[in-house]
Image (tube, rainbow, N blue to C red):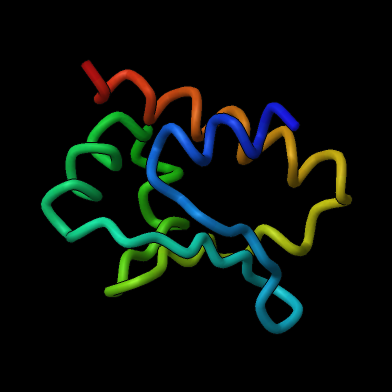
Amino acid sequence: MELKQLAKKLGFSRIKPENKQHVVLETAMEEPAWNLLAANLPDNLKTRFVYSPGKVTVRGLEVFKADQQLQNLIDAFGRMQGAIP
C-alpha cells in the first residue's frame, strides 16, 4: 500500500511487470518533470530508470524476489520525493 501511495504522489498511475526482467511505471508526466524526479536518484539507479512518453521502465528489477522489488521501488520513490516541494 505504501508503494501505491508514493507512486501516486509522484505521478505514476500504474505499476506492472513487463516481459520477465522489467517493471513499467505508467505516467502522464512529461520529460522535464521526469528529469526533476530522476535528478534525486543516485547514479547507480539512474541507469535502471528509462523514461519514454507515457511510461518509465525500471530495467532489471524482475531478477529480484518480490519483497526486494517492492523495497527497491519504495527506496527509489522516497529519494524522488525530495524533488517535490
Q: Position of residue 53 (x, y in %)?
A: 27, 74
**Relative height, residue 34 to residue 24 (above, below):** above
* Residue 14 shown left or right of residue 21 in the figure: left
Choose top left, top right, bottom left or bottom right for residue 80: top left
Choose top left, top right, bottom left or bottom right for residue 63: bottom right
**Relative height, residue 75 to residue 54 (above, below):** above
Q: Nearer the viewer, residue 28 or 20?
A: 28
Choose top left, top right, bottom left or bottom right for residue 28: bottom left
Q: Residue at x 88, y 51 (%)?
A: 65
**Relative height, residue 81 to residue 67 (above, below):** above
Q: Residue at x 76, y 79 (%)?
A: 20
Q: Residue at x 39, y 60 (%)?
A: 27
Q: Position of residue 48 (x, y in %)?
A: 47, 57
Q: Residue at x 40, y 68 (%)?
A: 55
Q: Residue furthest left?
A: 32
Q: Quadrant of the C terminus?
A: top left
Q: Nearer the viewer, residue 24 or 22?
A: 24
Q: Position of residue 4 (x, y in %)?
A: 64, 39
Q: Position of residue 60 (x, y in %)?
A: 63, 64
- In this figure, what is the number of numbered marks? 0
Q: Quadrant of the N terminus?
A: top right
